[in-house]
Image (cartoon, rainbow, N blue to C red):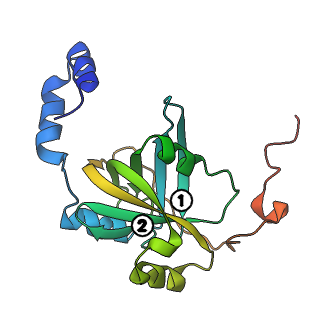
């Protein structure tokens, strides 16, 4: 278990035994029922992708509880909603299907879950009707694409250093092009 590059660093830094215990007790090649329930309760996820040359992107996705669908123990799916039109994640996936998802429960347990696998993009028209129905009830934005993930590994991110947050009311402007509502000029001022 573990990649060769991980093992080289573990040997160099003296953590090989500790890492072996982690692999044996925490690393799964599927989503356990507890992991599936955890994912179903989350309203955000961080998506990590890289293009064919290794240039990386990490982008959050937000929605309502159940943002990422658990299809079965080896398959997840999430919708790409209308956004800024850049499609950094989808562009990377088209060149390199490897994907990492990080779910963190900032509101209750402060536990996280890493899910790594291979992703494929699918047009909204090719997705089963029950997936679409699930999202019509939850989100008002148009789904532009679906990303379907074949799970290769899943493991815990411990809660030791994760802060606990609380939800505050905020109007969400799904699918807006209004630059003020999007705060699109936030980093553009000098000084």
At 84% from the left and 42% from the top, the residue drawn is 188
147 sits left or right of 182 in the view: left
Rendered location of residue 32, percent (x, y): 19, 62
Rendered location of residue 170, percent (x, y): 67, 72
Quadrant of the image containing the C terminus? top right
Rendered location of residue 35, percent (x, y): 26, 62
Give the spatial CA distance, label 1 vs label 2.
9 Å
* Residue closest to the far front: 126
Rendered location of residue 30, percent (x, y): 20, 56
Label at residue 68: 2
Q: Mark 1 packing: few (<14 Cα in 10 Å), some, or many (20+)?
A: some
At 16% from the left and 24% from the top, the residue drawn is 16
Vertical relation: 104 (above or below) 18: below
For label 1, the residue is 61
114 sits left or right of 121 in the view: left
At 60% from the left and 70% from the top, the residue drawn is 168
Front residue (pair 84, 35): 84
Label at residue 155: none
Quadrant of the image containing the N terminus? top left
Which element type, helix, strand or loop, lies under badge 1?
Answer: strand
Which element type, helix, strand or loop, lies under badge 2?
Answer: loop
Vertical relation: 185 (above or below) 136: above
Q: Pointers 1 and 2 in contact (CB under 8 A)?
A: yes
Q: Is residue 182 visible?
A: yes
80 sits left or right of 179 in the view: left
At 12% from the left and 45% from the top, the residue drawn is 25
- Of mark 1 and mark 2, the one earlier in the sequence is 1
Q: Which corner quadrant of the image does residue 76 belong to?
A: bottom left
Q: Mark 2 packing: few (<14 Cα in 10 Å), some, or many (20+)?
A: many
Q: Is residue 159 visible?
A: no
């Amino acid at each position: 278990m573990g990649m060769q590059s991980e093992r080289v660093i573990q040997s160099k830094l003296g953590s090989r035994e500790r890492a072996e215990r982690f692999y044996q007790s925490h690393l799964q090649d599927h989503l356990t029922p507890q992991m599936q329930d955890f994912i179903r309760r989350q309203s955000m996820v961080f998506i990590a992708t890289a293009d064919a040359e290794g240039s990386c992107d990490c982008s959050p996705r937000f929605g309502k509880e159940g943002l990422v669908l658990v299809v079965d123990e080896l398959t997840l799916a999430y919708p790409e909603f209308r956004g800024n039109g850049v499609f950094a994640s989808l562009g990377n996936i088209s060149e390199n299907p490897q994907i990492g998802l990080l779910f963190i429960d900032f509101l209750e347990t402060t536990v996280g879950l890493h899910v790594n696998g291979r992703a494929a993009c699918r047009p909204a028209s090719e997705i089963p009707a029950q997936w679409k129905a699930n999202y019509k009830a939850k989100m008002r934005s148009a789904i532009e694409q679906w990303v379907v993930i074949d799970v290769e590994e899943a493991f815990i991110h411990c809660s030791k250093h994760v802060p606990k947050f609380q939800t505050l009311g905020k109007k969400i402007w799904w699918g807006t092009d209004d630059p003020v509502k999007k705060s699109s000029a936030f980093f553009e001022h000098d000084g």
